[in-house]
Image (cartoon, helix red, strand yellow):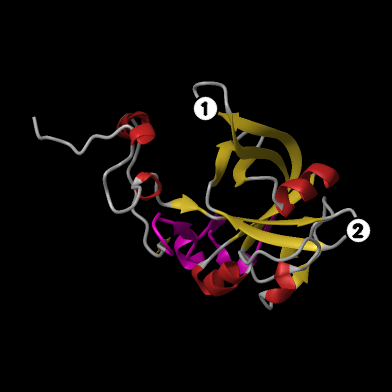
Amino acid sequence: MPTTHFYEPSKGHRLPHSPFKAIVAPRPIGWISTVDPQGRVNLAPYSFFNALCETPPIIGFSSKGRKDTLRNAQSSGEFVANLATYALAAQMNLSAAELPFGEDEMRLAGLDAAPSTMVKPPRVAASPAALECKLLSITELHDLDGKAVDWFLITGQVVGVHIDPMYLRDGLFDTAMARNIARCGYRGYYAETDKLFEIVRPDEASALSQR
């Protein structure tokens, strides 16, 4: 059996940089817009983000520390996940800047806001798709010893979906055309979704063969 590079995270990886975020990749970008109690807009990207449930649609992202996005979502009970794409990568990166509380990252990145339908936070007008969400939970994560690690998991149920009709092909959202981007670990590494391939699940293949 081939020898692997094995390490226990608590004892160090013995590599130039931790490979964890490069192994668990690509990870979709949760480009989250919120508003504070005064109605001021906040926009920030989160690389620990994904869909958690299909019915009802639930998404989640995690935040290191109690950042503005978490505080706004907690106070308002709402947020919007905007699709980050290759065409918007530079603006997404600009919105990661750490600004004073209340400053508008959407404006800093030169992005136009579009009104949402079911929630107060606006969405990124140029994004091909956006998910309006109502907050479900905020959970502080703990390690095996029960110690809080200052990371928070935020989950929300999708109550409204916006799709730019340009990206619909025969009623299907064209991910390759939208060119979704995803985080790939290490400093500044991203992937672009510009090509798809299909694998039919065994149960579906069996059903097709019996027709």
Depth check, front residue: 143 or 162:
143
Pointer 1 residue: 143
Membership of 62 in magenta stretch:
no
Q: Amino acid at mark 1?
A: Asp
Q: Amino acid at mark 2?
A: Gln
Left or right placement of residue 133 versus residue 141 in this view: right
Q: Position of residue 119 (x, y in %)?
A: 82, 51
Q: Position of residue 39 (x, y in %)?
A: 88, 60
Question: How many residues crowd mark 2 within 10 Å: few (<14), some (14–19), many (20+)?
Answer: few
Pointer 2 residue: 38
Residue positioned 57% across, 26% down in the render: 147
* Callout 2 touching callout 1 (CB < 8 Å): no
Q: How many marks?
A: 2
Label 2 or label 1, whichever comes before in sequence order: 2
Left or right placement of residue 55 versus residue 37 in this view: left
Direction left: furthest residue: 1
Direction bottom: furthest residue: 110
What's drawn in magenta, residue-wise?
161-188
Quadrant of the image occupied by residue 165: bottom right
Left or right placement of residue 89 versus residue 3 in this view: right
